[in-house]
Amino acid sequence: MKKEDKGVIISQLAETVKEFGHFYLVDVTALNAEKTAQLRRKCFEAGIKLVVVKNSLLHKALMSIEDVDFSPLFDSLKGTTAVMFTNVANVPAKLLKEYKNENPVLKAAYAEEGCYVGADQLDALASIKSKNEVIADIIALLQSPAKNVISALQSGGNTIHGVLKTLGERPE
């Protein structure tokens, strides 16, 4: 490969990392052609961009990004590496959990501005909440007290009305 081609690939990888914000480094060596095609299809359906890269080019692309320190991930750049780029941090982890003890195997990930190294981090990555999930949780928490107050007022109003009606109908 020519040096100019490598430079183009490095800059494209760096732009892709910046564009998506979250990525997973995965070892897919044990997958046959059929399982690889299934993985690619599932990734496409989930909005994940799956790319097989040369480790040295990805290393240089990550080094070229000055805003973030990706150095904890560099030791994971050995063997065959596929990169799963995504906008939602937990989607690839949930997809990888479907495979359980089979391959693909998680090597490392960069999600929510943190580095996760090792396959044992898969549960932690899957439990990360997306921005929309956090917003939904906050809205539910904010609505809960208001709903409780309205419910209490409505039930209390019916109770008070019933008590007053009973007292009014009672003979003196």
Image: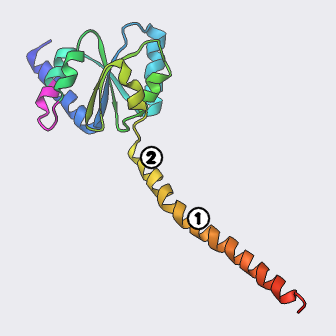
Q: Is residue 156 above or below residue 41?
A: below
Q: Is residue 32 above or below residue 77?
A: above
Taking the spot 17% from the left edge, 27% from the top edge, the residue there is 62
- Residue 124 rendering spot, x and y as whole percentages: 39, 30
- Residue 91 rendering spot, x and y as whole percentages: 42, 33
Residue 133 marker: 2
Taking the spot 45% from the left edge, 46% from the top edge, the residue there is 133
- The answer to which of 122 and 86 lies nearer the viewer is 122
Q: Is residue 62 magenta?
A: yes
Confirm whether residue 41 shows in the render: no
Confirm whether residue 57 shows in the render: yes
- The answer to which of 17 and 116 lies nearer the viewer is 116
The magenta stretch spans which residues? 61-69
Name the residue that disc number 1 marks: 148
Task: Answer with left or right where residue 146 lies relative to residue 74.
Answer: right
- Residue 129 rendering spot, x and y as whole percentages: 41, 41
Task: Answer with left or right where residue 14 lies relative to residue 160.
Answer: left
Task: Answer with left or right where residue 55 lies relative to residue 124.
Answer: left
Residue 65 marker: none
Residue 52's image quarter? top left
Which image quarter holds the N terminus? top left
